[in-house]
Image: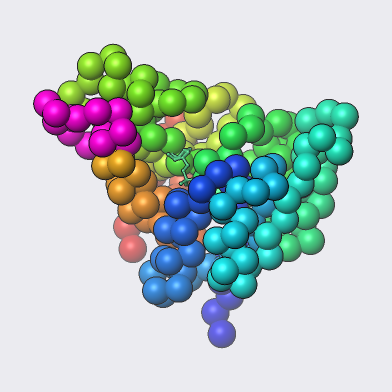
Amino acid sequence: MPSVTNIAVLASGRGSNLQAIIDSIESGYLKAQITVVISDVGDAYALERARKHGIEAVFIDTKRFSSRELYEKEALRVLRKHDAELVLLAGYMRVVGRTLLDAYKNRMLNIHPALLPAFPGLHAQKQAFDHGVKVAGCTVHFVDDKLDGGPIILQRCVEVAEDDTTETLADRILEQEHKIYPEAVKLFVENRLRIEGRKVKIIKS
Ligand code: GRF
C-alpha cells in the first residue's frame, strides 16, 4: 500500500474549506487522510464536520494558556500525537506564532479570499469590493511569519459583476476556494512544489 500524507486542519469557523478537502479525499482525488481537526472555537461547525466524517476533532481553549507560545505548544503536542505531516489553515482566525511556524516550516498552507499581496488580513472580500476592483479572487500560499505573506502556490480570479454585493462576490470567491485548495494540497502531497525564494515552482506530473 502506498503511504498517504497525514493532514491536520486548523479552523475557527464554518469549515467549508475543510469540507472541500474531506470531499476531495473521499472522492479519491487527494491521496491523503485528515488525522485531526483542531479549533480554537469550541462550537465551530468545522469540528462538527470532522466528527461527521469520523475525524478526530479537538477544541483547544486558548483561555487555558497564559501565552500564545503555551497554547501553540499544546497544539503542537496534538499535531504530533496525530502524526500530522502537513497543516492546513482553513478559516483559522489566529496569527500563527514561532512555535508552530518552526515546527511546520514549508509544511503549512493557508487559503485567503483575495488575490495576494492585495488585501491581506480580515474581510478581504469586502476590502476588495470597497476598493472597486474589477477582478477579485483567492490565493493558496505557504505560511510564514508575515500575515498572508508566504510564497504563493495557486491563485484564481473572479470577475466582479456590476450588480455584485460583497456577499455575492464572496460566495463566488468561496466556490473557487473550494477548487484551488484541494488542487494545491494535491500538488503538495505529490511532492510537486519547490519553493525558490518568493516563487513556488510547480513540477509537471
Ligand atoms: C475563507 O474565506 C478563507 O479563505 C478564509 O476564511 C474563510 C473560511 O471559510 N481564510 P470556511 O470556514 O472554510 O468556510
Q: Which x, y percent locates residue 91?
A: 52, 41
- Residue 160 lies in the magenta stretch: yes
Q: Which x, y percent locates residue 104?
A: 66, 45
Q: Is residue 28 visible?
A: yes
Q: Residue furthest left?
A: 162
In the image, taking residue 60 as reference, residue 20 lies left or right, namely left
Q: Nearer the viewer, residue 169 or 71?
A: 169
Q: Nearer the viewer, residue 128 or 116?
A: 128
Considering the image in quadrants, where does the C terminus appear?
bottom left
Instruction: Give the vertical position of 109 relative to 164 (above or below).
Output: below
Instruction: Give the vertical position of 74 relative to 117 (above or below).
Output: below
Q: Which x, y percent locates residue 12?
A: 60, 42
In the image, taking residue 191 as reference, residue 27 lies left or right, namely left
- Residue 120 lies in the magenta stretch: no
Q: Which residue lies at the image location 61% right of the left edge and 48% below the top edge?
A: 44
Q: Which residues are magenta?
A: 156-170
Q: Residue furthest top?
A: 131
Q: Nearer the viewer, residue 105 or 45?
A: 45
Q: Which x, y percent locates residue 47?
A: 62, 56
In the image, taking residue 155 as reference, residue 58 lies left or right, namely right
Instruction: Give the vertical position of 133 relative to 191 (above or below).
Output: above
Considering the image in quadrants, where does the N terminus appear?
bottom right
Q: Residue furthest front?
A: 43
In the image, taking residue 70 as reference, residue 171 lies left or right, namely left
Q: Is residue 152 visible?
A: no
Chosen colour scheme: rainbow
Q: Which residue lies at the image location 73% right of the left edge and 50% below the top edge?
A: 59
Q: Which residue lies at the image location 43% right of the left edge and 26% below the top edge?
A: 123
